[in-house]
Amino acid sequence: MKLRLSKPTRRQFITCAAFLFFGVFLLAYAVFIEPRQLVVQRQTIKLPHWSPALNHLKVAVITDLHVGCLSVPISKLRRVIVTTNEQKPDLIVMLGDFVASHGRSSALKPEEFAHELSALKAKYGVYAVLGNHDWWYNGEEVRNELQRANIHVIENASVQLKIDSASLWVAGLADQWTRTPSIPLAIKSVPVGSPCLMLMHEPDLLRDVPESISLSLAGHTHGGQVSLPIIGAPILPTDLGSKFARGLIVEGDKHYFVSSGVGTSVLPVRFGVPPEVCILDLISQ
């Protein structure tokens, strides 16, 4: 007995062609359009452990540049810098993964992108932690070049900033995947109750930060790079789940902020998670 395959109708043919076209369009958008965008994400955050003297401190958050990946050539890096400077931030914090690398090779050398980053301007300076990709490449080299560019790299330590009549502490943790982060070391010099920003690359340690820290900031997730309607991000590089994919998370008196960053890793795609520079306006509750 022979099976006969029915000839597709005109309607079926048009439907299949439409689905194919739509699929190709979405793929092209995710590879060539959205990853090349840049949005400014603004958010006002009310903090319980914050001095009124520091109200409306404007903090720019830049993370996961992955300079040299398909969507972040040197021209895109310059856009990030210009866009950030246009916001006139009081403080700039950078949360790691400057390098586009899974090993000892990188499309753009640290001295090249650090030279560009030296153009960042903030009244109270630029502070950074390093990420797993930076250390997979050569963390010491990345750190040295950034510091030559007047970007202060912090690892398991803190820095005190004098802002008018108030003090603000900026603490930074070592990368969790490649180093040994220590919260006690990072905040050892910070007086309990003093306004403090905690910088880290991966968000997995956010919940371990004590309530006395005003705001903890992380990157690394890229927001999943792909966020689908209803489903959200199918893949996230964190054990904390989709709640910590991106944005502001509040748990009691603890406040966390995760940025989805600028570049891409593994796959050169973004869908529903456009590259971002975050501008946070910090005020007391």
Image (cartoon, rainbow, N blue to C red):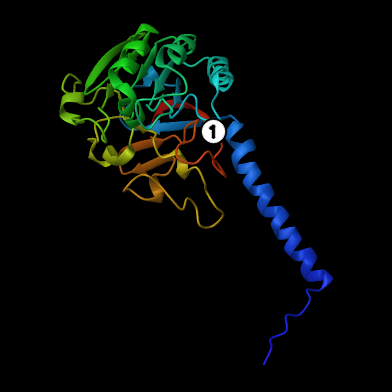
Position of residue 247 measured from the top left corner of the image (x, y, whole percent): 45, 39
Identity of the residue drawn at 43% across and 18% down: 92
Position of residue 120 measured from the top left corner of the image (x, y, whole percent): 48, 12
Viewed as shown, does residue 27 lie left or right of 250? right
Q: Residue furthest bottom?
A: 1
Mark 1 nearby-residue class (10 Å; few <14, some 14–19, many ≥20): many
Position of residue 212 measured from the top left corner of the image (x, y, whole percent): 24, 31
Viewed as shown, does residue 255 lie left or right of 280? left
Above or below residue 112? Residue 19 is: below
Position of residue 136 measured from the top left corner of the image (x, y, whole percent): 31, 29
Front residue (pair 64, 94): 64
Above or below residue 226? Residue 103 is: above
Instruction: Locate the N terminus and report the quarter of the image it occupies.
Output: bottom right
Residue at disc 1, secondary structure: loop
Instruction: Locate the C terminus and report the quarter of the image it occupies.
Output: top left
* Image quadrant where residue 161 sits: top left
The residue identified by callout 1 is 275
Q: Is residue 129 visible?
A: no
Q: Give the residue type that dot 1 points to.
A: Pro
Q: Is residue 261 visible?
A: yes
* Image quadrant where residue 190 sits: top left
Front residue (pair 266, 84): 266
